[in-house]
Image (tube, rainbow, N blue to C red):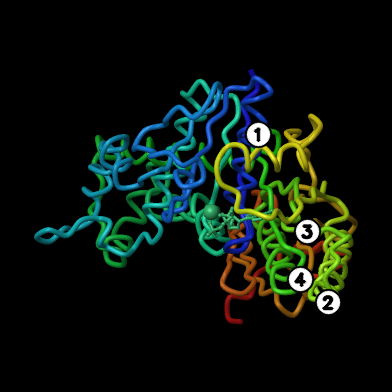
Amino acid sequence: MKKRIYIFTGKGGVGKTSVAAAHAMKSAGDGHKTILISTDMAHNLGDLFEIQLGREPKYITDNLDAYEIDPEYVMEHDFSAIMKSLNGFFPQGEGISLADYGMLPGMEELFALLKINEIYQNGAYERIIVDCAPTGETLTLLKFPELLSWYMEKLFPVGKVAVKVLSPIAKQLYKVELPNRAAMNDIEKIYLKFYELQELLKNRETTSVRLVALSEKMVVEETKRNYMYMNLYNYNVDGLYINRILPDNLDNPFFDEWLKIQRKYKEQLYESFAAVPIYEIPWYDEEVRGMKAVNRICSDALTGDEVFEVREITQRESFEQNSKGYMLKLSLPFVEKSEVDLYQSDSEVVIKIGNFKRSIPLPNVLRTYVVTSAKMENGILNIQFEKGEMDYEQ
Ligand SMILES: Nc1ncnc2c1ncn2[C@@H]1O[C@H](COP(=O)(O)OP(=O)(O)OP(=O)(O)O)[C@@H](O)[C@H]1O
Ligand SMILES: [Mg+2]
């Protein structure tokens, strides 16, 4: 059984929950064991199915369970060992817990993701459909495993020799206690969990990110940015849903302008997402509530088996050898070169766009190379490395 994960995201209110639920219903109807999971703190799966959901997955219909993750419960109930050892690394005052510490923002969301990994590894589900919070929060969530394994590597390098060298500084900066042997094993276990999570979510054969949008200026702009950031973090976006499309034959002048607007931005979406499969969902005369309404989306927009196909759309970042040295290629659609900041240290290159930053570790062979140029070309950022010394003074 090939297990798969589908993550639905998009701007607030565009229809993420409705579209994710439609996929879950279709998948279950096709006979695949499916779970629909919400990581949005403002859960609304329960409302959608008009059923009270609990702290564990609940039966919705044949082959379909639904589950609203409560991260606090998950932290205490499923990962208490991790919490205990993590808590042990930070000095604690009266009644202060790691969650209050603030050094690891988004901790709760991270546990929601760890739970997804656990369900993927241990659960009997073939398809995991994830209904996410609006774009910003989802991005924070998805960059988190990488960020955290970066921290872990810096603070607790898995090569144990390095711990001794790093510890005095780490101790000063982060007030971290020097981990002893037993604790080190815990750290390694936690590290491996984050690493495994990151590998799972970035595995293009396993995990798809699907974007839900409306045919309106603000939404289209956010969707394009979202797509660019997904590419920055190397997630596989292989589906775009344009929701709430007005019927052409509306005999009401009030909608004339709206129809024009929708047509215009729909065209833009088709141009911008030419490489991605696109699905259109009509605007219904009622809210999407209850299984019948959800099934309407299935029969109008999700016909055909390819809906669940996981396709490799964008290229992974790649290092290519050329006459000058090596070229790092990174797909970053819809971004201007002036928006990109780039730094190099001896072990990684850091790419920063707006508030988002990604560190790409350099292969050993590139440690004696420096970045000599960076060019944006057809949505690909090409970073040239040539042999040389880094000038730390600059
Ligand atoms: N195609 C549609 N036609 C009519 N109503 C729709 C359609 N799609 C979604 N809706 C309605 O729009 C509202 C928002 O949809 P939904 O909850 O799926 O969006 P969301 O992106 O999950 O929102 P949030 O960001 O708040 O989680 C709901 O009331 C839903 O019933
Ligand atoms: Mg929602």
**Front-lying residue, 347 or 256:** 256
* Dot 2 and dot 3 residues touching (CB under 8 Å): no
Callout in the foreground (4, 2) = 2
Q: Does residue 198 appear in the picture of this structure? A: yes
Real-space CA distance between mark 3 and mark 4, rounded to the nearest whole angstrom = 28 Å
Mark 3 and mark 4 lie on one chain; the one further toward the N terminus is: 3
Task: Tell me: is circle 2 under 8 Å from ligand 1.
Answer: no
Q: What is the C-alpha distance between the residues marked 1 and 2?
A: 42 Å
Q: Quadrant of ligand 1?
A: bottom right
Horizontally, is 131 left or right of 336 in the view? left
Quadrant of image for the N terminus: top right
Q: Quadrant of residue 347?
A: bottom right
Q: Amino acid at mark 1?
A: Thr
* Residue assigned mark 3: 245
The residue sitting at the front extreme is: 251
Measured Cα–Cα span from mark 4 to mark 2: 30 Å
Secondary structure, mark 1, is: loop
Question: Where residue 254 sits: x, y (%)?
Answer: 79, 76
Q: Looking at the picture, how far across and down is residue 375, in whole percent?
A: 83, 70
Is residue 384 in view from this perspective? no
Q: Report the residue marked by disc 2.
A: 257
Q: According to the image, label 4 marks what residue?
A: 335
> Within 8 Å: ligand 1 and the Cβ of disc 3?
yes
Q: Which amino acid type is marked by label 2?
A: Glu
The residue lying at 76 percent from left, 50 percent from top is 281
Mark 2 to mark 3 CA distance (whole Å): 14 Å
| Circle 4 SS class | loop
Residue 240: x %, y % from top left? 75, 51
Among numbered discs 3 and 1, the one appearing first in the sequence:
1
For label 1, count other residues whose C-alpha is less than 10 Å away and answer few (under 14), some (14-19) or many (20+): some
Q: Nearer the viewer, mark 1 or mark 2?
A: 2
